[in-house]
Amino acid sequence: MFIVILIAALALWGAIATVVELGRDGFRAVPTDWSRVAEKS
């Protein structure tokens, strides 16, 4: 039973850490900077 609780706690910790890091790393839609895109021929 202890192992089940330990695994559940680790899964919860991982899910929370993922949400926090996605918010922290600037994950968002960014408009394309067309001056940096290669010209089409």
Image: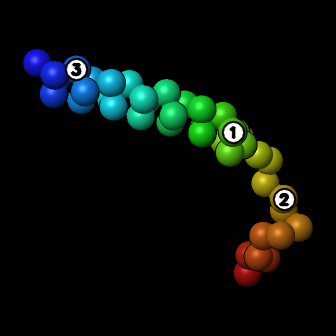
Question: Which residue is under mark 3?
Answer: 5
Q: Secondary structure at mark 1?
A: helix
Q: Residue furthest left?
A: 1
Q: Residue 5: horizontal and vertical position, in percent?
A: 22, 20
Q: Where 21 sits versus 41, above or below?
A: above
Q: Residue furthest right?
A: 35
Q: How many numbered circles does the render carry?
A: 3
Q: Where 26 sits versus 1, above or below?
A: below
Proximity of marks 1 and 3: CB atoms separated by less than 8 Å? no
Amino acid on which disc 3 is placed: Ile
Of residues 16 and 6, the one nearer the viewer is 6
Q: CA distance from mark 2 to mark 3?
A: 48 Å
Foreground mark, 2 or 3? Answer: 3
Mark drawn on residue 24: 1
Residue 9 is drawn in which quadrant?
Answer: top left
Quick check: 41 left or right of 19? right
Foreground mark, 1 or 3? Answer: 3
- Image quarter (top left, top right, bottom left or bottom right) of the C terminus: bottom right
Q: Secondary structure at mark 3?
A: helix
